Each structure stands twice: as structure tokens, then as C-alpha cells.
Image (spheres, grey):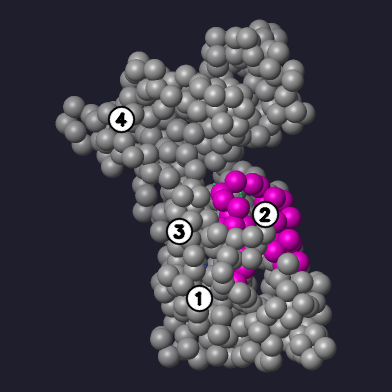
Amino acid sequence: FGQHFSTQEQTPQICVVGSGPAGFYTAQHLLKHHSRAHVDIYEKQLVPFGLVRFGVAPDHPEVKNVINTFTQTARSDRCAFYGNVEVGRDVTVQELRDAYHAVVLSYGAEDHQALDIPGEELPGVFSARAFVGWYNGLPENRELAPDLSCDTAVILGQGNVALDVARILLTPPDHLEKTDITEAALGALRQSRVKTVWIVGRRGPLQVAFTIKELREMIQLPGTRPMLDPADFLGLQDRIKEAARPRKRLMELLLRTATEKPGVEEAARRASASRAWGLRFFRSPQQVLPSPDGRRVAGIRLAVTRLEGIGEATRAVPTGDVEDLPCGLVLSSIGYKSRPIDPSVPFDPKLGVVPNMEGRVVDVPGLYCSGWVKRGPTGVITTTMTDSFLTGQILLQDLKAGHLPSGPRPGSAFIKALLDSRGVWPVSFSDWEKLDAEEVSRGQASGKPREKLLDPQEMLRLLGH
Ligand SMILES: Cc1cc2nc3c(=O)[nH]c(=O)nc-3n(C[C@H](O)[C@H](O)[C@H](O)COP(=O)(O)OP(=O)(O)OC[C@H]3O[C@@H](n4cnc5c(N)ncnc54)[C@H](O)[C@@H]3O)c2cc1C
């Protein structure tokens, strides 16, 4: 009775590490389902919202509307934001566990999967995530300055991020003018001479990882035409018919585009296109080929693969044949993984996640996780939302059952003093709202939703930090 009583009466102090969708949806659930719970969200960037700001493409503004809900959550008097605080560096997870009743790790999956092939370090080879961060205003990518003077770009991987990057490379720059793309990236895209984008996958059409919305946008992208080889779809008709519904619609769209003769209007549109995108299947990157002077990328050697095994376990194995594809830009988008941020937290290097049982970090009472650090870097924002609500729910269950430390906890009162003693100045949510207003006002002149601030020093100066 005592324990149950105390957890009901006390003010649960909960800490969330990371202010992306997972962090905000976890906080939302906790605040909604416990009337006294207090949630502090820590974030290493100066600004909140994670990949909604730095990942989601600028020409997908509707996806960013979730920011309004997060803003409501943050404005609750039982929620606080501490930006500019890198957990594992400025404050340890152990210190957070001492200060709070529970700690939720929601710090996403920031590391990109390396290609691990010769020539990977040549200028002109980038991770797609860095390229995305560049046009989305992630401060650490602002100097990326990719050389877009070549004709052909190759993207490795066939997920939605690959299509995002291909779409941004081929969209007529004027169509991006009124988005929140950084002015610097838009300027570079205006000078771009990239006309051909190949999106290369190790496996076949049945294994593509993108979704129908992104594919349809690609097929209809103004000024472009698709390059799909009907031979890649031979004998697939029956397999497509058997596929589950969402998969089936996606595959049918691909098959139609690849094998059906376009109508008069569409044929004319394609004939007048000045840019093209295509899908290459059964090719895995073997080596990045240097230019004659060895100074940058000039192409990529792809190993021809064939599929072995069936269903989920299908693997691509090299046949021994290779193909050289000339290109001046290589973007790898073959997946991500989380990184360990604190030695006190267990980590699964193979899966690239924090090991957990439905959100409870294994062997660490009071420690939870949600989002990409929990499930791995797949899933759209709604997937992350559902998953984060589940973590919030399990945490509240444990609280109710008395499995969390009882008695009062100091929460931010302790951590603030600690950060202060270390010379770390957190950014509050109302600080962010000042930066937000500044970005919005800088966008006004050019008719953009905002002009993102890219220089951390300037941002801190604006806040009087
Ligand atoms: C390029 C790209 C485009 C996408 N486009 C879409 C789309 O159009 N629609 C859609 O539904 N989904 C999209 N997604 C997927 C969506 O972004 C994810 O489902 C979602 O962001 C995952 O949420 P998360 O909170 O786990 O991770 P994140 O959004 O990555 O948030 C993690 C946060 O933790 C912070 N952090 C990291 N380390 C620390 C630390 N040590 N201390 C403090 N804070 C830390 C990070 O700075 C970040 O703010 C896209 C993903 C990418 C990569």
C-alpha cells in the first residue's frame, strides 16, 4: 500500500533524451495519462524536433505539421526543454537517473552505414543523410558544398531517403523557392548541372524499401522522365498479384511505369524532359572509381548480384560480373544505426540499438527507450508515434506498480546546477520560440516559411547566451 500510495501522490520526474518525434510523443503520452508527471526533454542541438526539421524534405511541408502538436506539448507547464545539452558528454545518464524517477532514451539513429569499399573517401562521395542535413540546415552539414557540376549522380539504396535526395536533385529549382530549404543549398541547386540520377539497389524490384507516395511524386516530377528497364520486371507479374495490398499497389505502379507504353500526353511530357531518374537493380557497390588525377569520384564499380533464399531472408550475392557506371556524385543511403552515448547504457552493436524489452532497457531499472534508438531506423513518424506511446504506457505501468524509485526526486533542480557548474547553458523552449520567430521573419522577404539559422554562434548570440 505504502509504495502504491507514494507513487500516486508524488510528482513523477521524468527525463527524455532527444527532442525528435519519439521524445515528444513519449512526453505527450506521459503528460496526458498522468496529471502530475513532469517531463524534461534534453536535446544536444540548439533547437527541437529532430528529423522533422533536419530530415523531412523541404518540399514535404505537410509532414512537418506534427511540430504544432509538439509545440503544444512543450508549452505545457509540466514540460521543459533543455537544448544545447549533449547527454553522455555534458551530463551522464547515471546523473540523470539519480535526478529523475525515470529516464527515456529517444536519441534516434545518427550514424550512417559506411559502404566499406575502396575509394569511399574520395571527394564527391557523401552519406545521403549529410546531403539531406545540408539542404535542411543541420549546422554540422552547412559547409558540405557538394560539387554539382557533373551530369550523373548515383544513389546507393532504394528507400524513401534515396527518393527524397533524387527528387531534390532533379526538381526545377524554382519549385523549391518557397520552401524552407536553406538559401545556400537552393543557390547551389540553381547552379547544378546534374541531369541524371540512378538509384541503385542490391536486390530486385520486389525488395524496394520506398513507399508509393514518394514513388508517385518521382514519376510525376516536372521536367523529368523515368528510366526503368522492362527486363527487370520479367516474370514478376504473378508474384506482384500475390503481394499484400500496400506492397501490391506499389509494385503495380512500378510495373506499369516500366512496361506500359505511356499515353500521347505522357509520351510528349517525357520527350520534352531535360532530366531523368532511373532504378538499377541487382547491383552492389564494389569500388568508387577515381578521376584520372585521382582527386575525386568519376564513377562507381557495381557488382552484379543475384538473389538467394526466399522471403524475408532473400540475400543478394555477387555473381562475379561487374559494371562501371560513370558519375560525379555518389550518395549512400543504405541505412543508419544508433550510437552508444554513455558507457553505462547497454548497446547492441550488431542491431545498432539500445537492447530493450518493449521499451524497458535491459538490466537497467528506470531506464526506457523509444523511437529509432529502440526499434532501429525504419518507420515513418506515425510508426514512431505509436511506438513511443507504448513506451510511455509501460513506464506509467511500472510507476503505478511501484517499480520506479519512490520518494521525491530533484529533477532539473539538480541537473541545472550541475550544468551550470560545467559551464553549459541550456536553451529553453521560449528561447527556441525567439529563434523560431527570427527564422520566420527572415523567410518573409523571400516568401519562404522560414530561413533557417545555421550558425550556432549566431543563434546563441541572438539568445544573449
Ligand atoms: C532524411 C529523412 C527523411 C524522412 N522523411 C520522413 C517523412 O517525410 N515522413 C515521415 O513520416 N517520416 C520521415 N522520416 C522518418 C522520421 O524522421 C523518423 O521516423 C523519426 O524522426 C524518428 O524519431 P526519433 O525521435 O527516434 O529520432 P530523431 O528524429 O532523429 O530524434 C532524435 C533527437 O535526439 C537528439 N540527440 C541525439 N543524440 C543526443 C544526445 N547525446 N543528447 C541529447 N540529444 C541527442 C537528436 O539531435 C535529435 O533531435 C525521415 C527520416 C529521414 C532520415
Quadrant of the image containing the N terminus: bottom right
Mark carried by residue 93: 1
- Residue 363 visible in the current orientation: yes
Query: Residue tagged by mark 3?
Result: 339
Query: Residue tagged by mark 4?
Result: 287
Mark positioned earlier in the residue sequence (2 or 4)? 4
**Side (left or right) of 408 relative to 185:** right
Mark carried by residue 460: none
Question: Of residues 90 and 260, which is closer to you in this image?
Answer: 90
Residue pictured at 66% horizontal, 7% vertical = 261
Mark positioned earlier in the residue sequence (2 or 1)? 1
Residue pictured at 21% horizontal, 36% vertical = 295
Mark positioned earlier in the residue sequence (4 or 1)? 1
- Residue 196 visible in the current orientation: no
> Considering the numbered disc 2 on the image, is that residue within a helix, a strand or a loop?
helix
Pinpoint residue 50: horizontal percent, then vertical percent. Answer: 57, 60
Q: What secondary structure predominates along the stretch shown in magenta? A: helix
Report whether the residue tagged 2 is closer than 8 Å to ligand 1. Answer: yes
Q: Which residues are magenta?
A: 367-393
Cβ–Cβ below 8 Å for labels 2 and 1? no
Mark positioned earlier in the residue sequence (2 or 3)? 3
Q: Is residue 251 magenta?
A: no
Query: Residue tagged by mark 2?
Result: 384
> Considering the numbered disc 4 on the image, is that residue within a helix, a strand or a loop?
strand
Considering only vertical position in the picture, is 462 above or below 98? above
Task: Tell me which amino acid carries mark 3.
Answer: Arg
